[in-house]
């Protein structure tokens, strides 16, 4: 039996820097689900808790979840913190990744290598995913209380459920818990022989060094036969350990486990998306120095100077107007990840040049040469706010006006003086590194494809954006041992992953306005390495942009794997309805698709993602479609799933940027709920310039 698959045959998973993808499965949990629902409702409705009481005892266990060595405690990773680690206590070796997904919720994924067991295929890695939910954070009155489920998704050979209680009497932190299955142990509760006790204590000797002791409930001799690395069981059920922080965020540990085994661990912890290099500061805040009235100024010279200043600040597609009463600047943000920060920079430039009798400063943010969001403020209010004379809450709630606009009405007025045209390049050239990793095939545990992708983007006319990207692989050992399904849509993907040089994107996107908050898109060309075709989309943002409704459709032809411009006699189409909901409190976006997918299956696809304060985005998706049209066992009855990560590229540089890196994990030998990727779809185009999203981080306007 293969430990790596939840099917009878092994499956291959794909991680790609290119297109995001997710994981999920039903799991049974013996603790009341109602507690989780109540807490999540609280988190979504009211102010969230701060979990500072978990520090400094929210460190990693062997298997990646927050705990001591083999037992969990009631501590969790802080919201948005990610932890990468490895641990060894022979014959077990763990490679782990954990994250604070939401306030109170910790998610962990791990690979466990049982080094003294080898399967038929020559490796013994087990993949598993764990979830911990902190019902109550520690307070003066209450201890921290958490419930968790281990190995709820994966091969389910190391499953357990638990409730843990932790109480800190600094420098000590005590944990007592009850668990099932692998955490049940030998000490059972009276009249509950399927539930047992575990516990431990951690002592902080200082800021950097901790001692640990725990009662280890794991009965290794009762593990699954294919994962019984210690068939004789533990010699002694008490584990002892020490861990220390050698550098900020980097922790190592040594332990003596099971009465006869030395253990070691290394974990690196950081805020997801946090700057690796310090940001080079922007120019200092500009304050007005030339306050001469409109009648004393050369208005054409003034708007030209404003135009040059905004262009020098790194923005594009700029127009500046004045009618002797207001000053307006339209621009596209091509410099910052934050549109709020971009608007703040432009407003300060306008303030610097504004006459003393200027009635209003207006900044208009554009996309594809289409004005979308207008931010307006009185010069006196902005100046007093920047000088600290107006409180933030008063300024944000009543003194700055934000609204969606449909067209540049100011440019149509005859009495407006407009800045002269300035030379601007309408194309961008760059090179993107590419690394794709493929996991869990029967031939190799890990396969890799690496290379570079030079690209060119151009703006040929209003609303249009052309994109060409050439794939230059340096190395590839990609091979799928499983045969593709009949008439494969995606299961023959390995044929396209050889060392062959080709355009993986060669397309043009035309975006146009349907109404003030309605947009349309037509795309034509090569959508990815596998498909060329034509697609269209319409999307309407309702109200302040929290909800968006739309339709999309694609008709595509499959490309020849090793040819540049040849197409196969194989075409497919999809037609899908879209509903988006943006929840401002936790910066979460819920996206539901319904319709016919490329392989002909009909049904739903749910995508949920969250953006953190650093700009990083984490999400997952899961499908529920009618798979009766599939005849092969891999697709029939399958639910497509995956997780994805988007990191702001600025974290690797000392300057800001709006570019992002993507990485995803999903099964790739499946055809269920298949779509073609859309480069810059309409929701991504407009969501950040809708009032709901823009106001959620309005404080960045002063950065």
Image (tube, grey):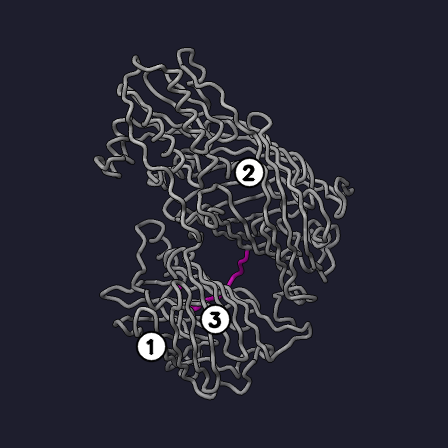
- Residue 23 is a magenta residue: yes
Q: Estimate the spatial distance between the alpha carbons at disc 2 and disc 3, rounded to whole Å.
A: 39 Å
The location of residue 16, given as percent across then percent down, is 60, 53
Q: Which of marks 1 and 2 is nearer the N terminus?
A: 1
Closer to the camera in the image, 418 or 673: 418
Q: Name the residue under label 1.
A: 201
Residue 351 is marked as: none
Q: Estimate the spatial distance between the alpha carbons at disc 1 and disc 2, rounded to whole Å.
A: 51 Å
Span of residues in magenta:
22-32
Closer to the camera in the image, 253 or 425: 425
Residue at 73% across / 53% down in the picture?
495
- Up/down of 475 relative to 163, above or below: above
User: Mark 2: which secondary structure?
Assistant: loop
Q: Estimate the spatial distance between the alpha carbons at disc 3 and disc 1, rounded to whole Å.
A: 18 Å
Residue at 73% across / 43% down in the picture?
559
User: For the N terminus, which image quadrant?
Assistant: bottom right
Name the image quarter holding residue 253.
bottom left
User: For the C terminus, which image quadrant?
Assistant: top left
Q: Callout 2 environment at 10 Å: few (<14), some (14 to 19), or many (20+)? A: many
- Up/down of 352 relative to 34, above or below: above
Residue 212 left/right relative to 590: left
Residue at 33% across / 24% down in the picture?
353
Q: Name the residue under label 2.
A: 681
Residue 559 left/right relative to 690: right
- Up/down of 588 relative to 510, above or below: below
The location of residue 657, given as percent across then percent down, is 47, 42
Q: Name the residue under label 3.
A: 63
Q: Earlier in the sequence, mark 2 or mark 3?
A: 3
The location of residue 410, given as percent across then percent down, is 42, 18
User: Mark 3: which secondary structure?
Assistant: loop
The location of residue 606, given as percent across then percent down, is 52, 49
């Amino acid at each position: 039996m293969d430990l790596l698959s939840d099917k009878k045959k092994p499956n291959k998973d794909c991680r790609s820097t290119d297109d995001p993808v997710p994981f999920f499965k039903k799991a049974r949990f013996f603790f009341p689900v109602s507690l989780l629902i109540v807490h999540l409702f609280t988190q979504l409705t009211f102010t969230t808790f701060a979990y500072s009481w978990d520090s400094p005892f929210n460190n990693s266990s062997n298997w990646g979840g927050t705990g001591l060595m083999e037992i969990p405690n009631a501590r969790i990773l802080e919201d948005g913190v990610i932890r990468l680690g490895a641990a060894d206590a022979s014959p077990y070796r763990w490679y782990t990744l954990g994250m604070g997904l939401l306030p109170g919720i910790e998610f962990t994924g791990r690979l466990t290598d049982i080094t003294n067991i080898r399967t038929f295929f020559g490796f013994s890695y087990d993949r598993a995913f764990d979830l911990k939910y902190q019902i109550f954070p520690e307070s003066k009155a209450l201890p921290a209380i958490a419930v968790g489920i281990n190995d709820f998704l994966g091969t389910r050979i190391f499953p357990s459920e638990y409730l843990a209680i932790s109480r800190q009497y600094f420098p000590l932190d005590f944990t007592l818990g009850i668990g099932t299955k692998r955490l049940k142990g030998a000490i059972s509760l009276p009249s509950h022989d399927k539930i047992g006790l575990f516990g431990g204590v951690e002592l902080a000797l200082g800021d950097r060094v901790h001692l640990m002791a725990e009662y280890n409930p794991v009965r290794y001799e009762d593990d699954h036969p294919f994962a019984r690395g210690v068939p004789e069981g533990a010699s002694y059920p008490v584990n002892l350990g020490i861990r220390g922080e050698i550098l900020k965020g980097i922790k190592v540990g040594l332990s003596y486990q099971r009465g006869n085994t030395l253990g070691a661990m290394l974990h690196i912890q950081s805020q997801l998306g946090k700057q690796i290099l310090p940001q080079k500061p922007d120019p200092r805040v500009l304050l007005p120095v030339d306050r001469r009235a409109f009648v004393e100024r050369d208005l054409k010279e003034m708007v030209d100077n404003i135009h040059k200043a905004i262009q020098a600040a790194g923005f594009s597609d700029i127009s500046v107007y004045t009618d002797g009463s207001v000053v307006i600047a339209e621009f596209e943000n091509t410099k910052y990840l934050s549109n709020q920060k971009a608007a703040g920079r432009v407003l300060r430039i306008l303030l610097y040049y504004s006459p003393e009798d200027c009635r209003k400063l207006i900044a208009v943010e554009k996309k594809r040469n289409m004005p979308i969001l207008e931010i307006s403020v009185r010069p006196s209010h902005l100046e007093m706010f920047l000088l600290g004379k107006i409180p933030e809450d008063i300024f944000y709630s009543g003194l700055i006006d934000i609204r969606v606009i449909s067209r540049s009405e100011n440019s149509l007025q005859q009495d407006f003086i407009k800045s002269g045209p300035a030379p601007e390049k309408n194309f961008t050239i760059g090179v993107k590194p590419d690394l794709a990793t493929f996991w869990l095939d029967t031939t190799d545990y890990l396969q890799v494809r690496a290379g570079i992708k030079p690209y060119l983007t151009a703006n040929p006319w209003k609303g249009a954006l052309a994109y060409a990207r050439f794939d230059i692989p340096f190395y590839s050992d990609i091979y799928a041992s499983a045969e593709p399904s009949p008439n494969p849509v995606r299961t023959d993907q390995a044929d396209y992953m050889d060392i062959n040089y080709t355009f993986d994107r060669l397309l043009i996107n035309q975006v146009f306005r349907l109404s003030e908050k309605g947009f349309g898109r037509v795309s034509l060309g090569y959508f990815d390495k596998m498909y060329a075709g034509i697609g269209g989309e319409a999307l309407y943002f309702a109200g302040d942009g929290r909800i968006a409704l739309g339709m999309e459709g694609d008709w595509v032809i499959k490309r020849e794997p090793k040819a540049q411009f040849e197409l196969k006699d194989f075409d497919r189409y999809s037609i899908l309805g879209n509903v988006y909901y943006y929840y401002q409190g936790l910066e979460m976006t819920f996206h539901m698709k319904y319709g016919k997918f490329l392989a002909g299956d009909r049904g739903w696809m749910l995508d949920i993602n969250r953006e953190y304060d650093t700009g990083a985005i984490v999400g997952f998706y899961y499908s529920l479609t009618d798979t009766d049209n599939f005849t092969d066992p891999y697709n029939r009855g399958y639910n497509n799933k995956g997780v994805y990560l988007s990191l702001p590229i600025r974290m690797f540089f000392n300057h800001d940027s709006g570019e992002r890196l993507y990485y995803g994990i999903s099964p790739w030998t499946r055809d269920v709920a298949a779509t073609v990727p859309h480069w810059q779809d309409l929701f991504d185009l407009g969501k950040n310039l809708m009032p709901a999203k823009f106001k959620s981080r309005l404080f960045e306007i002063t950065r």
